[in-house]
Amino acid sequence: MTGEKDTPNLARRDLLKKAGLAAGVAGAAAVANTGDATAAVADEATASAGYTETEHVQTYYELAKF
């Protein structure tokens, strides 16, 4: 009876180790994917023409008396 309780359940430990590893890999993949999206957004922002005074901006200036 003591022999059964003294031996650790190695299959369960392996499962927990693999689950932790999988969570780490998934987290790293998520970070890698958002990095590419952030770079694409940054590229679009630098490629813009800059400040443009649109109709709603002009309306704001008129209401604010600038």
Image (cartoon, rainbow, N blue to C red):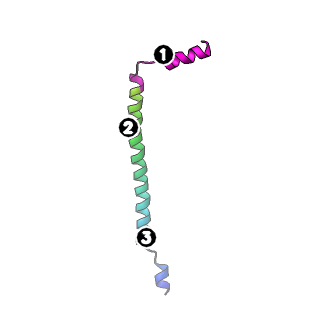
Residue under the point 41% across and 66% down? 15
Percent from the top left, x then y, of residue 27? 43, 50
Residue found 42% across the figure and 72% down from its top: 10
Above or below — where is 16 with respect to 47? Answer: below
Picture quarter with the C terminus: top right
> Earlier along the polypeptide chain: callout 2 or callout 1?
2
| Residue occupied by mark 2 | 36
The reply to whether the C-beta atoms of the residues labelled 1 and 3 are less than 8 Å apart is no
Mark identifier at residue 53:
1
Location of residue 59 with respect to 17 vertically, above or below: above
Which amino acid type corresponds to the residue marked 3 in the rendered image?
A: Arg
* Secondary structure state at the residue bearing disc 1: loop
| Label 1 environment density (alpha carbons within 10 Å; few <14, some 14–19, many ≥20) | few
**Residue at 57%, 14% in the rendered image:** 62
Amino acid type for the residue under numbered disc 2:
Asp
Give yes or no for residue 58 being in the magenta stretch: yes
- What is the crowding at mark 2: few (fewer than 14 residues within 10 Å), some, or many (at least 20)? few
Instruction: Name which residue type carries label 1.
Output: Glu
Going by the image, does 60 lie left or right of 25? right
In the rendered image, residue 17 lying in the magenta stretch gets the answer no
Q: Nearer the viewer, residue 44 or 36?
A: 44
For residue 12, the mark is 3
State which region is magenta.
45-66
Task: Name, please, the residue furthest toward the top.
Answer: 66
